[in-house]
Amino acid sequence: MFGLNQYGANVYAKVSMETGVLAASPNKLIVMLYEGAINACQSAIEYMQHQDIVNKGAKLTKAILIIESGLRASLDKKAGGEIAESLDALYGYMSMRLSQANIRNQPELVKEVIILLADLKEAWVAIEVGQTASQPFTNAPPRVESLQIPVAINRNIASYAKV
């Protein structure tokens, strides 16, 4: 009996998530990718604390896939110029740190990536809020050259891009 109810809840959650994705603006989709990577990283830390190697690896792999196949793959380096190049390097750095965290079982490396992801997510949330206020009826993504990333994040990107 419980299995059937759990299945129904899982189906409902999946439909709800898919509906949210279909209705989301491009900026919101990026925010959702950051949230997914952050959640996977947080779960990985919990699994590390419980010495659950299989689930830790699965969650870190999920976070890396979100970063590589979602965030990094969506970069347009031609249009994005220096910002896109810096983000590309930062995403590569994050993936490397998560791989190291998985091999070494070091939650502090995962926490470092969570901080970076959270900073970038905040910047995209600010962009989404700003766009919603100034362009309420458009789903067009922001022009990369008008992207205003906070100075602290720019410093982080610059310092990690050289790694």
Image (cartoon, rainbow, N blue to C red):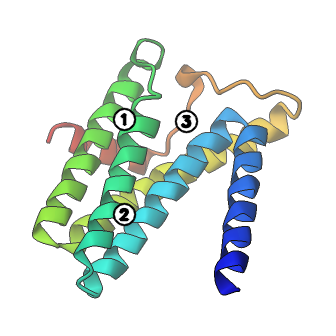
Asked whether, in this view, residue 29 is left or right of residue 66, the answer is right
Tell me: residue 55, above or below residue 17. Answer: below
Where in the figure is residue 65, as x and y percent of width and height?
A: 37, 45
Q: Quadrant of the N terminus?
A: bottom right
Numbered disc in front, either 1 or 2: 2
Label whose residue precedes the other's in the sequence (2 or 3): 2
Q: Residues within 10 Å of mark 1 (few under 14, many from 20)?
A: many
For residue 6, which numbered disc appears in the image?
A: none
Numbered disc in front, either 2 or 3: 2
For residue 87, which numbered disc appears in the image?
A: 1
Residue in the picture at 41% in, 73% down = 43
Q: Quadrant of the C terminus?
A: top left
Q: CA distance from mark 1 to mark 2?
A: 22 Å
At label 2, which amino acid type do we have? Lys
Residue at mark 3: 148
Residue furthest out toward the top: 78
Q: Residues within 10 Å of mark 3 (few under 14, many from 20)?
A: few
At label 3, which amino acid type do we have? Gln
Residue furthest out toward the right: 137
Label whose residue precedes the other's in the sequence (1 or 2): 2
